[in-house]
Image (spheres, rainbow, N blue to C red):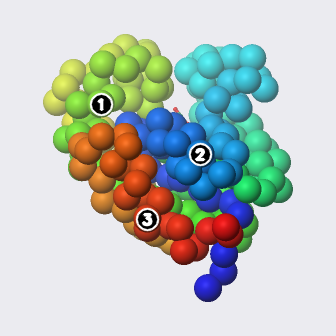
Amino acid sequence: MTKHTRIYITGFMGSGKSTLTPSIANVLGFDSIDLDVEIERTSGMTVAEMFELHGEPYFRRVEHELLQKISGRTNIVVALGGGTVTIENNLQLIKSTGLLIYLKVDPEILLRRVKRKQHRPLLKDSNGAQLSEEVLRERIHSLIQARELYYNQADIIIALGDSSIAKTVDLIVSKIRNRVQP
Ligand code: S3P
């Protein structure tokens, strides 16, 4: 079995990618990087500002370029954005350069986590205003339905509940350790 030196973490918005990735990397002795944070750092604007000023297609181009750069690094765990793997080019690049892990979280847990956060343009209305809980629930369901086909192409799918961060990190590491280069 191939032992990987590059791990990619995918999952829907609110699944815990950005929170868990640094701890997973720490346990494995790898570096960690967050694609959205890198986009914001290199562009000097937030993801929300980029969507508003330049639109989603521009954001996806920037995201792809950065992913290409990151995919050349080794000993690294990468927190992807929730939509990164839904772009065919990205998915191919990810699958050909590392191990893809899907953090699968119940939509009701996702809803609870994202509903008070304001920074995600895809979870707002077209004027950037907050959605009602019912509309947000429908948005989450329809996006997951459209995306599950991509998420399910992950090498390892890990169903997560509401456990502590420490327990969740232990669970993830136990499932991936034998696929990672020590
Ligand atoms: C997106 C998820 C966001 C961010 C952007 C688009 C998506 O990242 O990349 O707002 O398409 O699901 P998180 O999953 O870290 O919130």
The image shows residue 105, relative to residue 110, as above or below, that is below
Q: Secondary structure at mark 1?
A: helix
Q: Residue at image x 30%, y 40%?
A: 164
The image shows residue 5, relative to residue 129, as above or below, that is below
Task: Give neighbour class at mark 2: few <14, some 14-19, many 20+ (Cα, 10 Å).
Answer: few
Residue 55 showing in the rendered view = yes
Residue 135: image tag: none
Assign the N terminus to one quadrant of the image. Answer: bottom right
| Residue hosting label 1 | 113
- Which sits earlier in the primary sequence, circle 1 or circle 3? 1
Residue 63 placement (x, y as % from top left): 69, 41
Q: Residue at image x 43%, y 58%?
A: 172
Amino acid at the residue labelled 1: Arg
- Which sits earlier in the primary sequence, circle 3 or circle 2? 2
Q: Is residue 168 left or right of residue 136?
A: right
Amino acid at the residue labelled 3: Ser
Q: Is mark 3 within 8 Å of ligand 1?
A: no
Q: Nearer the viewer, mark 1 or mark 2?
A: 2
Mark 1–mark 2 distance (CA, rounded to whole Å)? 24 Å
Q: Is residue 125 left or right of residue 37?
A: left
Q: Quadrant of residue 171?
A: bottom left
| Residue hosting label 2 | 26
Q: Secondary structure at mark 3?
A: helix
Mark 3–mark 2 distance (CA, rounded to whole Å)? 14 Å
- Which sits earlier in the primary sequence, circle 1 or circle 2? 2
Residue 174: image tag: 3
Residue 2 placement (x, y as % from top left): 66, 80
Observer-nearest residue: 17 or 132?
A: 17
Mark 1–mark 3 distance (CA, rounded to whole Å)? 25 Å
Residue 144 showing in the rendered view = no
Observer-nearest residue: 95 or 134?
A: 95
